[in-house]
Amino acid sequence: MDSSLILCYIWWISYLELLLVCSILLMKTSLKVTNEVTFVCCIMLALYSVFAITTSDWIAYNDIIKEQIRFHGTAATNLESFWIRLILFLKNNISFRCFIYVCSYSVFYLYLLFFIPASYRLTFIALYIFLGFYVLSGGRQILSIFLFYVAFELLKRNFFTCLFSIFLIVICSGLHKGTIFLLLPLFLMCIPINKKSVFISLCCVIFISLFLRYCLYDLITLYYPDYIYMYYFQEQAEEINISRRIYYSSQIVLFFKTCYVPYLLYLSFQSPSLYISKYRNFLYWGYFCYLCLYFANYSFSIPQRFINHMLLIPILVLISYLFHKKEYRLFRKMTWILLLLEILAANISISGIRQLY
């Protein structure tokens, strides 16, 4: 048996064990996490991510790094210039991943330490391992997302933190261009959420999704025929070489999450907590952007990335706050169903990637 396949099985089994531990922890309502335990959790997550050989990005980055080194950084790629220079300096996949995940989980640790209350931190980490750990094990995007939500927390505190927040957002867009899409719900947060704005936003979803579906692709192909991100607008079956099992399992999770988030928002609007209010408002407008992408239906990859990656942190904040409320039994059941679907989808994806070794 090939050594890569053996490592793949070891990582897969250890990942399942980690999920089992998280399931037990989610049932504990009174546990509080100290700063030291939070630090150990972040180190463990960084180590898991560095050696996540079962992710598609492991293979993709391995090929990109070899190609960039071979052509001395001049090979065609959609990577930002910072990452190309880093690849040329570090020379191999493991060193590259070590840099990304040490930086990422250092930022994640600071975020947990300063912005997530100790009473919700355990639930937040456990939910992150279920919902975000596997989908965010891809690389550079994870660092930009963590930095963005640190910047999000620092906004409107005072003039200097606001300036630093803008600086962090600029860095985020330099690390991963996709983070720019998060600026739209950030600006839309200026609009108060009430019955009138909800009605208008739902109407806008219809018109915007129709525009995206029937106009945007034609405009881009007309004026930018060689646009480097054009593959995001293609049908998913043509876009990436995945099996039907992986495709349909991801679609099921995406559909369930599309129904789950409105219920999550509904419950959060009933809570007077200031802690979740800004995340609730951000998630509302983020979900508005997601629906526009979802109903445009060019490729399920775009809305999937948006809700799984970009909106992950506000979703986790709201779930961790509401999860152990005794009056929300139906919500807890729906959350467990979502976690189960995510596990099944992740395992189908892992089994598909194992076939590549």
Image: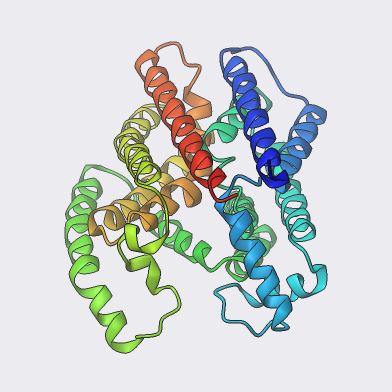
Residue 195: give x, y in percent of width and height. Answer: 22, 42
Q: Tell me the residue at 20%/53% (across/down).
A: 200
Residue 331: give x, y in percent of width and height. Answer: 38, 21
Q: Nearer the viewer, residue 188 or 32?
A: 32
Q: Residue furthest bottom?
A: 223
Q: Tell me the residue at 52%/62% (across/down).
A: 179
Q: Residue furthest front?
A: 1
**Residue 272 visible at all:** no
Q: Nearer the viewer, residue 293 or 284?
A: 293
Query: How many tags in the picture?
Result: 0
Name the image quarter holding the N terminus: top right
Q: Tell me the residue at 77%/57% (across/down).
A: 99
Q: Tell me the residue at 36%/86% (across/down).
A: 224
Q: Is residue 180 left or right of residue 206?
A: right
In this view, 57 is above or below 48: below
**Residue 339 visible at all:** yes
